Image (cartoon, rainbow, N blue to C red):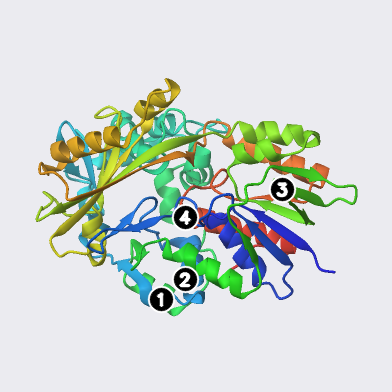
Amino acid sequence: MGRTVVVLGGGISGLAASYHLSRAPSPPKVVLVEGSERLGGWIRSARGPDGAIFELGPRGIRPAGALGARTLLMVSELGLDSEVLPVRGDHPASKNRFLYVDGALHPLPSGFRGLFCRSPPFSKPLFWAGLRELTMPRGKDPDESVHSFAQRRLGPEVASLAMDSLCRGVFAGNSRELSIRSCFPSLFQAEQTHRSVLLGLLLGAGRSPQPDSALIRQARAERWSQWSLRGGLETLPQALNAHLTSRGVSVLRGQPVCGLSLQAEGCWKVSLGDSSLEADHVISAVPASVLSKLLPPEAAPLAHTLSTIHAVSVAVVNLQYRGACLPVQGFGHLVPSSEDPVILGIVYDSVAFPEQDGSPSGLRVTVMLGGSWLQTLEARGCVLSQELFQQVAEKAVATQLGLKEPPSHCLVHLHKNCIPQYKLGHWQKLESATQYLAAQKLPLTLAGASYDGVAVNDCIESGRQAAARVLGTEPNI
């Protein structure tokens, strides 16, 4: 009788793991268990009254690098090529990004020429920060905060404005607490390998092998910066679900896992409340802190390590305006914590993906709220109402973009504990967990955003690698 693999969590990581398991030459029996009634995790799309698409979570996927290519290959394998909405390299959403500082929008320098021009809010051309970076010695610490790393190599302005904003935009986190080694491994490795981040990024670590398809070649030729799907990104998990069902994978929804216990014969008992499953191997694609509460007492050291990987909440407010115009054209803008502790950034959805606007006169923007403000409110046990988030978001849009009329449509969602925080020493936690699993020979594999990247591509890759480890194949293209 063949092996049974139970995958915990029906977000994009768990779906990707199940997908790659099901496509093996001799696939095991795969059971995907999701606690809620829907699949896709934080990827969620909604349709407005006029047909407009609103992304309640991620809104675009980057095609760059091997990970981006593998995701595009999966899209092709799922038959979604005709649904892809690309943002080409010559598009304003590819070329223009902004910082909101001192009450004004400032375009980030782009291109080689931009490095030599003074670009507010920076007091000097970024060429000087680059020159400083090239002359700095290599750091000696095994890890460092993003802020410390950026300040040491690029100067205080780049650290407090650009990197602070980037950490808020990607992780909804504090650059003074987040780890450069874990959050931006390419920057850390560039310094370690080449002594200079700029030299390292320029020389690269050698081109890694990438899959090939017509869609991948098109993305390269047109220099896509990101892409989405015509019906919203949730089309991807929906297509994965349909594919899994067609290949005989059992998909259980509304079945929260209550606990894991090891049986005498070395397999798992996965408790689901009134029922249970037996598994030869478990892939956990639920958050690390959730898994820590499911593990049996004999795995207490692993549970303790996982329990220290925390996540923060983000409020997403989708706004639609009739007949309004943005003051600038671009992807959106980020807001450093020194400017506004509440607003992480605003995405100009209608610029990147006008095909999803619904009504021709509809303008869509998305406001991200979080940071220390939201963490303080949560810690105090304050009532976090939709009205509060909408009020704050509308005020930000009026102040920062000049859209002062009331929106024609609004959606508010608070995503609790949605973005893991890779704080200083995160790499040691991963090392500890990996060593424990190997030493105890536990038939358990970890996947998902809690470990090696929070972007959609990272999560899909973590699922692919988890499946490869279970199947005993090396992760390859």
Q: Which mark is residue 256?
A: none
Q: Position of residue 235 (x, y in %)?
A: 42, 65
CA gap, disc 4 and disc 1? 18 Å
Q: Position of residue 173 (x, y in %)?
A: 41, 34
Q: Which mark is residue 456?
A: 4
| Residue drawn at 70 percent across, 45 percent down | 273
CA gap, disc 4 and disc 3? 33 Å
Q: Is residue 440 visible?
A: yes
CA gap, disc 2 and disc 4? 13 Å
CA gap, disc 2 and disc 1? 7 Å
User: In this figure, which residue is indicated by the disc labeled 2?
Assistant: 75
**Figure quadrant of the C terminus:** bottom right
In the rendered structure, are the residues bearing label 3 and label 1 in contact, judged by CB atoms less than 8 Å apart? no
Judging from the image, what secondary structure is the residue with disc 4 in? helix
Q: The disc labelled 3 sits on which kind of residue? A: Asp
Answer with mark 4 or mark 3, whichever residue precedes in sequence: 3
User: In this figure, which residue is indicated by the disc labeled 1?
Assistant: 81
